[in-house]
Amino acid sequence: MCGIVGYIGASQAAPILLDGLGKLEYRGYDSAGIAVYDGKKIQVKKAIGRLKVLSELTHDGATMPGTLGVGHTRWATHGAPSDLNAHPHYNKEETIAVVHNGIIENYLKLRKKLTEKGYEFRSETDTEVVAHLLDYYYKGDPLEAITKVMHRVEGSYALGILFREHPDRLYAARKDSPLIVGQGKDGNLIASDVPAVLKYTREVYFIRNEETAVLTTDGIAFYNMDGEEIVKNSTTIEWDLNAAEKGGYEHFMLKEMYEQPKTVQDTLKPRVKENTIEIEELSMTEEEIRSISRIHIVACGSAYHTGITAKYVFEGLARIPVEVDLASEFRYRNPILEEDALVLIVSQSGETADSLAALREAKGRGVKTLGIVNVVGSSIAREADKVMYTWAGPEIAVATTKAYSAQLIAQYLLALKFAQVRGRLTAEETAAMLGDLKKLPGQIEMLLANKERIQKFANRYIAAKDVFFIGRGIDYAISLEGSLKLKEISYIHSEAYAAGELKHGTISLIEEGTLVAAVVTQKDLYKKSMSNIVEVRTRGAFVLAVTNVDNTEMEKAADYVIYIPQTNPYFTNSLAIIPLQLFSYYVSVGKGCDVDKPRNLAKSVTVE
Ligand code: AGP
């Protein structure tokens, strides 16, 4: 939930650091700082607020000459956002500077020990402990000092480190927080994520847990926790820079909404050959698939909402019992995990601490784990027994859209595959459903073309105080996501309710003019859902209905209707969510909110 960068090479470091941090602000943006070795000393500049404050402070880096440096953009966990708590952090003599993403869980104990040894702390952060601990262990060999620190600290870290006495080297180390090394033409870089280095290189190394990297202007060496050199292969990144830029849209979120047809296509294509489903990365035998006794889907936020939809799909098609857990609850409820269960961890970033912890809990009990992840090489992707990527490309907006859509597709495919292997679906039935899936990209495109009409409607609700989303079955799952989208980017209070549950209390909140979004796509539940619409309308609600194109009854039942094209009832989430995303987006824009970086949120929540 912070972003770090580092550079060593022939060019001036500060502008490169600032540019890289600009691509990482989605990881956190309450303060930022850079440290640059200027030939004599390590100069540090840092400031509370967005990166542009730091850029202005340093005249876009011009006041910080030097070709070696590290930078940081922060999302506060220990110590409120402030100049002092911003990274980089120094040791006392200012001979060592550190940037850090993650949490040092035993920092209080270490801080106490170091204070007893005479160390003075300037900030409230856990990170500053690392700077002083490096000082404590440093006897002339940075790598030795770093390795000792790695043995002492508990928790997660991606570190970028400068030693004034070694100005020809940039050091990096990693445990649990993402960290990559970029091999450039005129220098080498470290970063928390690929977009920060793409402008300079496509050759990237993914640092694994408890590895360190030592970068010079023209070389990179990797070491394990015992200080032994290790060989690593680089990955060539296919994304072009635009893929991580706005591409002409006003916001990343709008761009990513419009990428959903492609995202769905890209997640489907490699796995559907003619009318059969090939999920190579699954590498499970048919016997193993047949022996799955229960599926546990574990995730957070929107990823969790896809899991609720997937429960209906897996149980409906493959008749496999499914439990869906919030990752932050899973680990602490002492879950009953049968040995032939399968745990699905769904995570766009692949770095969500709660989901990573749940993965480790499942693995620790010897249960098979499958990650459904968007970020190649992320922690969950690497630690799960198997990983199924969602191929959505970089998702920069904090509010997920295209990754959410891709997560749905991945779980539909798994459910279809399992159903087929377990004899629950004939080849013809599977082919028909694959046909429905292949139509989704075009249907999503059609719904996106509807944006003006939705924008007009959204403008009527910019001042709304409470909005309710209701639905039954999969429509309830859609309502959960619709409600979260509205809350997280427009700051309007909203609740999603199982439509049949509203009358057990919450309906007392409905008053004249309250907006209720009713999702009605499950044909077998039409009647019940329509009666729930009547319930709220008689109490004064204004009802926006999202329903199937053939449900003409809705014209009379609701105040405003948005139709979605025909598809299989199991797949309606992929369509109904589109107008709800657009609605939330335009309400947020109308309110002048920061759509891509909503207050208090970060794209990847790497703290529990
Ligand atoms: C989605 O709009 C939210 N920003 C958030 O709920 C997100 O889905 C959740 O934090 C999980 O993130 P992950 O998919 O990267 O694990």
Image (cartoon, rainbow, N blue to C red):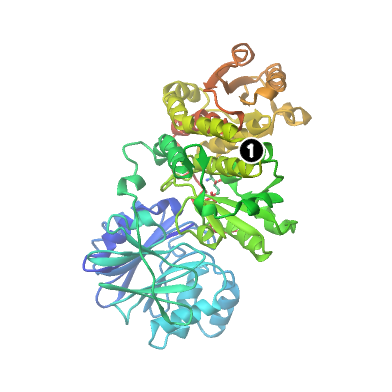
Of 361 and 8, which appears nearest the observer?
361
Residue under label 1:
313
**In this view of the protein, can residue 36 be seen by the observer?**
yes
Question: For this view, does 498 lie left or right of residue 420?
Answer: right
Q: Secondary structure at mark 1?
A: helix
Q: Residue 268: give x, y in percent of width and height.
A: 47, 41
User: In the image as oriented, which residue stretches furthest toward the bottom?
Assistant: 139
Q: Residue 508: give x, y in percent of width and height.
A: 74, 27
**In this view of the protein, can residue 64 be seen by the observer?**
no
Question: Looking at the picture, does residue 444 appear above or below residue 361?
Answer: above
Question: For this view, does 196 lie left or right of residue 483?
Answer: left
Residue found 43% across the figure and 82% down from its top: 228
User: In the image as oriented, which residue stretches furthest toward the right?
Assistant: 504
Residue 572 lies in what quarter of the image?
A: top right
Question: For this view, does 54 lie left or right of residue 280?
Answer: left
The quarter of the rendered structure image containing the C terminus is bottom right
User: In the image as oriented, which residue stretches furthest toward the top?
Assistant: 556
Residue found 42% across the figure and 74% down from its top: 212
Question: For this view, does 436 lie left or right of residue 46?
Answer: right
Residue 33 lies in what quarter of the image?
A: bottom left
Q: Residues within 10 Å of mark 1 (few under 14, many from 20)?
A: many
Question: Looking at the picture, does residue 549 appear above or below residue 132?
Answer: above
Question: Looking at the picture, does residue 518 appear above or below residue 96?
Answer: above
Q: Residue 125: give x, y in percent of width and height.
A: 51, 67
Q: Residue 25: give x, y in percent of width and height.
A: 41, 52
Looking at mark 1, is its residue's CB closer than 8 Å to ligand 1? no
Labels in figure, total: 1
Of 347 and 366, which appears nearest the observer?
366
- Which amino acid type is shown beneath numbered disc 1? Val
Residue found 44% across the figure and 23% down from its top: 450
